[in-house]
Amino acid sequence: MTDAGDRDQIEGKFNEGKGNVKQAWGDVTGDDRTKAEGMMDEAKGKGQGLLGDIKDKIEDVKDDIEQKTR
């Protein structure tokens, strides 16, 4: 089972990829709106990945504290 941080990282990678595809499609078709949506999706994905990293770090610190207090 994946934890919340891993899930955020996976969703983030998906959104980054989706954003890159939209940007490429927008470039090919000359559709500035699709390209802009792609940029937003990519930024959202990067944010989700960062959030996942932070959640993982917090979980690591929590685990360390629990081990030290036993």
Image (cartoon, helix red, strand yellow):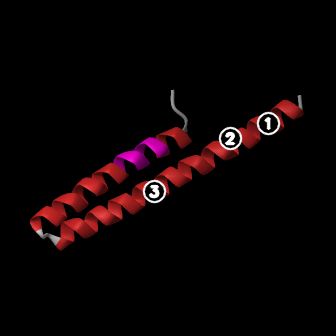
- Vertical order, 16 against 35 (above or below): above
Residue depth check, mark 3 versus mark 1: number of the one nearer the observer = 3
Q: Is residue 21 magenta?
A: no
Residue 15 locus on image (x, y percent):
35, 51
Find the distance from the CA under tag 2 to the CA under tag 1: 9 Å
Q: Residue furthest bottom?
A: 32
Q: Which residue has dot 1 on it?
A: 64
Q: Magenta residues, as a range? A: 9-15
Q: Secondary structure at mark 2?
A: helix
Residue 30 lies in quadrant? bottom left
Q: Which residue has dot 3 on it?
A: 46
Residue occupying the point 55% across, 53% down? 51
Residue depth check, mark 2 versus mark 3: number of the one nearer the observer = 3
Q: As shown in the figure, which amino acid type bears the numbered disc 1?
A: Asp
Residue 10 locus on image (x, y percent):
43, 41
Q: Which residue has dot 2 on it?
A: 59
Q: Secondary structure at mark 3?
A: helix
Residue occupying the point 61% across, 47% down? 55
Describe residue 64's horizontal placement relative to residue 34 as left or right: right
Of pointers 2 and 3, the one earlier in the residue sequence: 3
Find the distance from the CA under tag 2 to the CA under tag 3: 20 Å
Residue occupying the point 23% across, 67% down? 35
Q: Is residue 11 magenta?
A: yes
Disc 2 crowd rating (10 Å Cα; few below 14, some 14-19, many 20+) is some
State the residue in front, 21 or 44.
Answer: 21
